[in-house]
Image: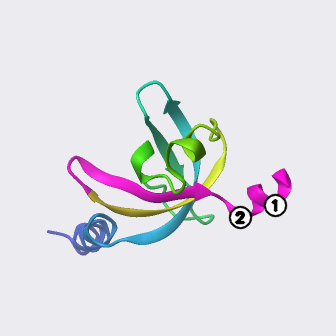
Amino acid sequence: MSRTNTLYKSHMFLFFHFSFFMKGIIKMMKPESGFGFITPIVAEGQKPHADVFFHFSKVEGGDATFKTLNRNDVVEFDVENGQKGPQATNVRPAAADMDAAA
């Protein structure tokens, strides 16, 4: 195995096995089903992460907050390893978006 593959796999291990805070843009939502996907925002020059699944039960403020979220909204969230891969938890509107709405 090459050094690049080893490094990549070690970074993927960190991505999938440890919870950390991120920002992203809501790519798709299915309000009737209670879930959606978030595209993580990465720094310029970094490889993009895969989209992250989120369920309304993982949105801070529950269903009321979930219903205020729309496609292309910027959100903050934590990532943890779910049953089928990375899953967003503690999803909340980004602070700058909340200030702009006020």
The residue drawn where x is 30% and y is 67% is 8
Q: Does the magenta stretch include residue 58?
A: no
The residue nearer to you, when weighing 45 against 3, is 45
Classify 37 as above or below 43: above
- Seen in the image, is 9 located left or right of residue 35? left
Is there a contact, CB below 8 Å, between mark 1 and mark 2? yes
Q: What element carries label 1?
A: helix
**Furthest residue toward left:** 1
Classify 14 as above or below 86: below
Q: In the rendered structure, which segment of residues is drawn in magenta?
A: 82-102
- Disc 1 marks a residue whose amino acid type is Asp
Classify 37 as above or below 59: above
Residue bearing mark 1? 99
Q: Position of residue 77 (x, y in %)?
A: 50, 61
Which picture quadrant has residue 71? top right
Which picture quadrant has residue 94? bottom right
Circle 1 residues within 10 Å: few <14, some 14–19, many ≥20: few
- Disc 2 marks a residue whose amino acid type is Ala
Q: What element carries label 2?
A: helix
**Furthest residue toward top:** 32
Which picture quadrant has residue 76? bottom right
- Seen in the image, is 10 located left or right of residue 89? left
Classify 3 as above or below 78: below
Residue bearing mark 2? 95
- Seen in the image, is 80 located left or right of residue 97? left
Circle 2 residues within 10 Å: few <14, some 14–19, many ≥20: few
Where's the C terminus, which quadrant? bottom right
